[in-house]
Image (spheres, rainbow, N blue to C red):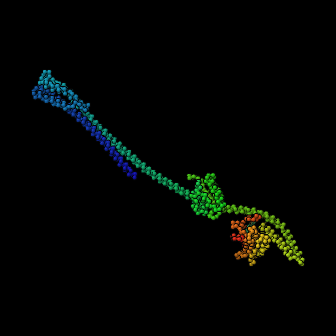
Amino acid sequence: MTDNSSTLTKRWSIAIIALLLSLGLGIAAFVYHSTTQMREALAEEILEQQHDVASLIHEYGHVMVSLERTRLSPTPENKKAIGAALTSAQDQLGRMRSNYSFARLDGAAEAYAYIKPVLEDIADWTNNGIAGYSNDNPFVLETAANRMGERYSVIRSISNETDAVATELISEQTDFLNNFRDWLLLLLAGFALLSLSIASLLIRQRNLQAQLAIDQELNATRLIEAETRGRRQAEDALLGSEQFLRATLNSLPSDIAILDQQGIISAANEPWKKFVSSNDTQYSNGGIGHHYEPVFRSTAMNEVERKGIDAATKHVSDVLNLNRDSMFFEYPCHRKDKRQWSVVSMSTFNTGDGRHAVLVHEDVSERKRLEERDRRLRAELAHVSRLTTAGELATGLAHELNQPLTAITHNCDAVMSSVKSDSQFDNELLETVHDISEQAQRAGGIIRSMRALVRKESTDMVPTDINKLVRETVRLTGPEARERGVSVLLRLDETLPHPTIDPVQIQQVLVNLERNSVEAMWQANSPVKELTIETSRHGSDHLEVCITDTGPGIEPEFARRLFTAFQTTKANGMGLGLSISRSIVEEHGGRLWIDPASEGVTIFRFTIPFIQE
Ligand code: ADP
């Protein structure tokens, strides 16, 4: 394209030079031609005049000669010759012009003016004579000859002068023409030079323009290349930093999303995407392009969580609306059907696009669980310390009570001996006193084992008939059950081996479970109030005791924390019975649990190994 334009430029320039040169040559030729013609016409005129003057002198001389000849020999032929010479001279005068265009060359006119009257006089004299003398008189002839002779020298000098002026004029003309030609050539050369200069300037300018265009094109190409390179580098760098950012974000365990000032999620890491999409699959890409609020709300599954989310979104919008720089908030939410405690924190940063915020969401359930466990442990510790105090009091009480109980037992023994010594003793009275003695001994036993339990003293592990133990506890709880309209049913496997246990502690477990059932049925005023205690084998090496009642049952949610200390629904309850019972059973190598809720019945079971390790 550049080559084409340069060729075009050259052609145009050559055409312009040719045009200018032809124009110059044409003008020069025209000027030269007309000047030469004019000068040639003038030269012709000069030569013509010179010739006229010379011819006139010649004719004049001829008249003079014919006069002289006639004076010397006045023959008729000679006289006639004078007339012929005069006629010839007159003719010559008639041919001459009196006025010439060349002012400086007036010789012919002068000669004409001088000679004309002389020739007229001579013609007059030679025809008519002078003052009475006849024309052939020698005096007339002499006078005429003298007259002509006088004028001849003048005419001669006019002729000479005319020659000189003509020569001068001719030389002037020649010089002028030569100069004019030189000047014209010079002019032409200058003109040609000028044309060439203009042409070369044009070519140069054109070439410069072409070069400039090429340079510009080259520069533009380089610029584009540089820009492209720069853009690619910038893109690479951006891509690199984006990938770095994405890799960094993805490597962090927390759920992270980037929000713009309007609260639209512009980026998110993989953990965030998993968290958000685990609750609502429509946000499988982490809700990028959506406002954070609905995305956030999709993680709340119940009223408590919704309230938490309300508070969290308010904090987030406070940061976005510049009301605060950062925030930190803890609330419960859901991650794929599982409740979790979350901490949402937020901080802002500014870029060319405006303000952005980094939203970090962390699962702190484990920390919460540990905190909760700590809290519970602290509570249990407090309880243990209360229990210790109670234990110390119980020790004192047991000591104090032991004596009256022993006294009661002794007194009962004394009463029984005295009753027996009577031949007609009252059997009923004897049984009652025996009963009192037994109860007093049991009370003493309970107090002792309570003391041992509280003091964590080593307990008396003895092979025990579990069925017998069950019957004894039923006897203990029987009065209360009867009072509350509860009928007690026993289904005991009499073939069970005797496990080695602390009978007082296991009895405590039994009493606790039985009393809970009786109280529950009574409190709920159940239409059927039945308490069933069943013993059986559990596997090859355990026995199982099952306590079933027809009470109101236990809410599944409450059942999950039933064995935790201080869980009670009773106004005067301590919420310790089940947790202590579980500890006792587990210390014996067994397990205590509640069956999953079933319509109309509540079932507690515990197992005890036959052989203690
Ligand atoms: P407390 O008897 O002092 O409340 P427990 O640990 O023995 O402490 O019992 C905890 C709670 O378990 C009771 O308050 C009661 O609400 C519930 N509970 C226990 N056994 C039954 C049962 N058989 N039926 C219904 N609720 C029961």
Q: Is residue 416 visible?
A: yes
Of residues 391 and 182, the one nearer the viewer is 391
Q: Is residue 477 left or right of residue 274?
A: right
**Residue visible at 79% across and 68% down in the picture:** 450
Q: Position of residue 392 (x, y in %)?
A: 80, 64
Of residues 221 and 350, the one nearer the viewer is 350
Q: Position of residue 294 (x, y in %)?
A: 60, 59
Q: Is residue 508 visible?
A: no
**Residue visible at 45% across and 52% down in the picture:** 221
Of residues 73 and 242, the one nearer the viewer is 242
Residue farthest toward the front in the current orientation of the protein: 527
When the figure is inspected, residue 279 is found, relative to residue 353, above or below; the finding is below
The image quadrant in which ligand 1 is located: bottom right
**Residue visible at 38% across and 47% down in the picture:** 203
Residue farthest toward the top in the current orientation of the protein: 132
Count of numbered tags: 0
Determine which quarter of the picture holds residue 451: bottom right
